[in-house]
Image: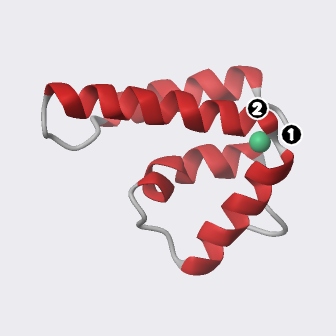
Amino acid sequence: MGDGGKCRDVVRLLADYLEHQLPADEHAALERHLERCQRCVTQLRTYQSTVSLLRSLREDELPPELRLRLKAFVDARCRN
Ligand SMILES: [Zn+2]
């Protein structure tokens, strides 16, 4: 994903990143992006709090529709 990647790449990988499912190089690239993109950091925090809220309600995996909704949310306001 290049040097830190773009916001879209970050959003696509966010769920896997938080679940520590990414290969080490992609994980590192995503963290490099977060160091210079405050908007994605904000997204990450929003995502994290949403996920932890869901997990406090039930133990299921993150629903696909939530991933899509978050992606659409970021696509609309984060355009690096
Ligand atoms: Zn970004």
Using the image as rendered, state which of residue 33 and residue 63 is in the foreground: 33
The quarter of the picture where the N terminus appears is bottom right
- Residue 44 in picture, x, y percent from top left: 58, 38
Q: Quadrant of ligand 1?
A: top right
- Sequence order check, earlier mark of 2 and 1: 2
Report the amino acid beneath label 1.
Asn
The C terminus - image quarter: top right
Q: Count of labels shown?
A: 2
Eyeballing the image, is 10 above or below 66? Answer: below
Q: How is the image coloured?
A: secondary structure
Task: State which mark lies toward you, 2 or 1.
Answer: 2
Residue drawn at (46%, 36%), measured in percent from left and top?
48
- The reply to whether dot 2 and dot 1 touch (C-beta < 8 Å) is yes
Can you see residue 5? no
- Left or right of residue 58, residue 14 in this image: right
Mark 2: give few (<14), some (14-19) or many (20+) Cα within 10 Å: some
Tag 2, which secondary structure? helix
Question: Residue 53 in the image: x percent, y percent?
Answer: 31, 25
Q: Quadrant of residue 78?
A: top right
Residue 56 in sight in this render? yes
Asked which secondary structure carries label 1, the reply is loop
Q: Which residue is mark 1?
A: 80
Residue under the point 81% across and 69% down: 2
- The answer to whether the residue bearing label 1 lies less than 8 angstroms from the nearest atom of ligand 1 is yes
| Residue at position x 69%, y 44% in the image | 8
Residue 72 point in image, percent of width and height: 57, 25
Q: CA distance from mark 2 to mark 1?
A: 9 Å
Say which mark, if any, is on residue 39: 2
Q: Position of residue 60 (x, y in %)?
A: 15, 40
Q: Identify which amino acid the numbered label 2 is placed on.
A: Arg
* Residue occupying the far bottom of the picture: 24
Residue at disc 2, CB closer than 8 Å to ligand 1: yes
